[in-house]
Amino acid sequence: MRKLKNLNLLFIVTMMVGGSFLLLSMTSIAPKPWQVPAKYKTMKNAKAGAKDAEGVAKALFKQHCASCHGVKGAGDGKKAAELESEIRDFGTAAFQSQTDGEIYYKAIIGRDEMPNFEKKITSEGDRWLLVNYLRTLKK
């Protein structure tokens, strides 16, 4: 009888510990929502509709974004597997439905594993051209 109680107790403890690990792993997988400041949500794209004749935005994407987001922005870059964050696919309707200002904030200001590019992409015009380029990656 005593042995049976010990086995039951061991089973219960094992299930509780396993359940705790499962819950912890699920919370770390779920992406936390971006908190985009209001001023960015309504920010107007200074280069809306502008043609990138020199391919500046594509070059910036290749240099700064493709290693994580992939060549076509699908979230399948070489470094993506090394990151804890979920890498977004720029072609999805959810991504494309954001305002230009929201995309600007996320792409340029960043957070957590998404780096800040204010010092690497210093031209405001180039930043907006990059936002325009991300718009071309829709499916």
Image (cartoon, grey):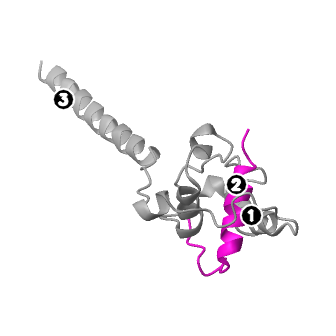
Q: Position of residue 105 (x, y in %)?
A: 53, 63
Residue 37 seen in the current view: no
SS class of the residue under badge 2? Answer: helix
- Range drawn in magenta: 114-139
Farthest residue, direction right: 54
SS class of the residue under badge 3? Answer: helix
SS class of the residue under badge 1? Answer: helix
The residue closer to the viewer here, 62 or 96, is: 96
Amino acid on which disc 1 is placed: Phe
Q: Earlier in the sequence, mark 2 or mark 1?
A: 1
- Using the numbered discs, state the Cα–Cα distance from disc 3 to disc 1 in whole angstroms: 56 Å
Determine the residue positioned at 81% across, 61% down.
Answer: 51
Determine the residue positioned at 70% across, 46% down.
Answer: 74
Residue 45 seen in the current view: yes
The quarter holding residue 19 reads top left
The residue closer to the viewer here, 12 or 54, is: 54
Quarter of the figure with the C terminus: top right
Judge depth for marks 3 and 1 and give the one in front: 1
Q: Residues within 10 Å of mark 1 (few under 14, many from 20)?
A: many
- Magenta stretch contains residue 86: no
Q: Residue 134: which numbered mark, if any?
A: 2
Q: Which residue is mark 3?
A: 9
Q: Residue 61: which numbered mark, if any?
A: 1
Q: Residues within 10 Å of mark 2 (few under 14, many from 20)?
A: many
- Using the numbered discs, state the Cα–Cα distance from disc 2 to disc 3 in whole angstroms: 55 Å
Total labels: the figure holds 3
